[in-house]
Image (cartoon, grey):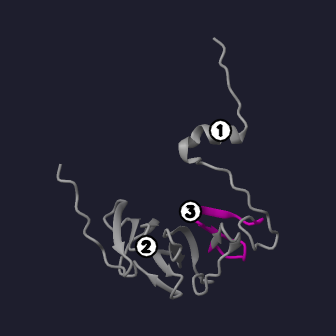
Amino acid sequence: MTKRFIFLPIFALASLLGGCAGYPRLVNYGYDPGGLSLNSSASELDPQISRRYIVFASDRRGSQDIYMFDTVTRTLVDLPGLNSFDTVASHPAVSENGRSIVFVGSRQGRSAIFLYDRETRQLRNLTANLQAEVRNPTISADGSRIAFESSVNGQWDIFVYNRSGQPLNVPQDPR
């Protein structure tokens, strides 16, 4: 029996997979060798999108930092006070309105979940009192809850915190 392969152009494949909403879609933003756009010659890691904003980690300035790109204005968003020279930042996520960004920050072999508020320009370590590794944060659409994985119990469990860094008791299905 002969196997047949069908090769489709990327736009045809995207339309087949996308369904009614038109997703996934191919976006095209220019390349900027100076690192002032979404695309650069540096590594762009862990991209996440929420409405008009794309957050990602990049080493374009010599250290791995978090960046935000506004798809409407097609520019990088200034994030004063977010990135620290002595912290490796990764795995960002952004609230629906783009006000809150969560990410993993690693310093001296220890990881923590950080929340950055773009309006107040404040950075908060949500897991300072948690003596364990943490990874893969995500944030609710309204920015009120942050979920992440933690190894505090010797295995990877999911924790949910509020934006003040307090654990939330999430009820479980009694089935």
In what element is the residue under mark 3? strand
In what element is the residue under mark 1? helix
Cα distance between the residues tagged 1 and 3: 22 Å
Which image quadrant for residue 44? bottom right
Q: Is residue 33 left or right of residue 143?
A: right
Disc 3 target residue: 48
| Most foreground residue, 105 or 103 | 103
Q: Is residue 22 left or right of residue 102?
A: right
Cα distance between the residues tagged 2 and 1: 34 Å
* Residue 135: image location, x then y, percent: 46, 66
* Residue 50: image location, x then y, percent: 54, 64
Disc 2 target residue: 143
Image point (60%, 37%), residue name = 16
* Residue 107: image location, x then y, percent: 53, 79
Query: Which dot, 1 or 3, sits closer to the camera?
Result: 1
* 77 shown above or below 122: above
Quick one: label 2 or label 1, which is nearer the N terminus?
1
Disc sitting over residue 13 in the figure: 1
Within 10 Å of disc 3 (Cα), the crowding (few <14, some 14-19, many 20+) is some
Quick one: label 2 or label 3, which is nearer the N terminus?
3
Instruction: Check disc 3 and give the amino acid type.
Output: Gln
